[in-house]
Image (cartoon, rainbow, N blue to C red):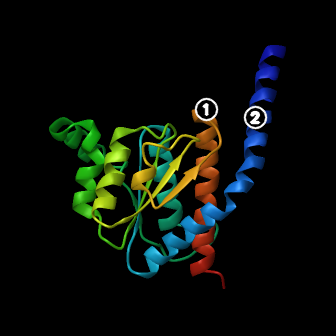
Amino acid sequence: MSNSINLINEYLEESLQLAKEQRNLSEIINEISIEAIKTIELGGKVIFMGNGGSASDSLHLSAEIVGKFQKERMGLPAISLSSNIAIITALANDFGYENIFVKQLEAVAKKNDLIIGITTSGESENIILGLRYAKQNNIKTVGFVGQDSKKIDDYCDYVLNVPSDKASMIQQAHITLGQLMCLLIEEHFFSS
């Protein structure tokens, strides 16, 4: 039993330390939020993509923008490319799993959109290919990653690097920082 308590305390201590370090990311999350606000003001939408836990984050964050974060209000335009299992499995079957986001971006992305790829490792091939497609088509891009983003840096206008190499810690930070983005977007459009 005491080993369980030790594991809990160690995990929470690591989480608290990372939360303190996230203060260093205030500028980049503010810049990303400003880009998302501009996107919406220009009639575009925020498009999220992710795998596994990051897919869940992409669903969560798009729901916060469309529905509400803290305020009852009109919906704002956002989607997650991780949401339609029929599309994902058909594309994976016909074009390979690495192309599940590229093919969807071909169908729904416009020049005034903002693409946010979420990957804890920074190495998810389907996220990299999606971001590359967006850059090649002059669509603004954001990468939410851990401390290593070398593979996606060339394809991102903004990179949010969480200072950790543990997936669980990176995912905690991604949802916290993503929710801060949703807060700033909501406050901009509905501050009264």
Quadrant that contains the C terminus:
bottom right
Say which of 165 and 33 sits in front.
Answer: 165
Q: Is residue 87 above or below residue 48?
A: above
Q: Is residue 189 above or below residue 161?
A: below
Q: Is residue 53 visible?
A: yes
Q: Label for residue 137?
A: none
Q: Is residue 24 above or below residue 191?
A: above
Q: Point out the residue furthest to the right here.
A: 2
Residue named by callout 2: 14
Q: Residue at x 55, y 73 (%)?
A: 34
Q: Residue at x 39, y 69 (%)?
A: 45
Left or right, 41 with reference to 125: right
Q: Is residue 5 above or below residue 88?
A: above
- Residue 93: x and y in percent read 19, 35
Q: Residue at x 51, y 75 (%)?
A: 37
Q: Label for residue 166?
A: 1
Quadrant that contains the N terminus:
top right
Q: Amino acid at mark 1?
A: Lys
Mark 1 burial class by Cα count in 10 Å: few <14, some 14-19, many 20+: few
- Residue 47: x and y in percent read 40, 60
Mark 2 burial class by Cα count in 10 Å: few <14, some 14-19, many 20+: few
Q: Point out the residue furthest to the left here.
A: 94
Query: CA separation, marks 1 and 2?
Result: 10 Å
Q: Amino acid at mark 2?
A: Glu
Where disc 2 sits, the SS reads helix
Q: Residue at x 59, y 41 (%)?
A: 147
- Residue 72: x and y in percent read 59, 73
Left or right, 50 with reference to 31: left
Labelled pair 1, 2 in contact (Cβ < 8 Å): yes
Where disc 1 sits, the SS reads loop
- Residue 20: x and y in percent read 78, 48
Mark 1 or mark 2, earlier in chain: 2
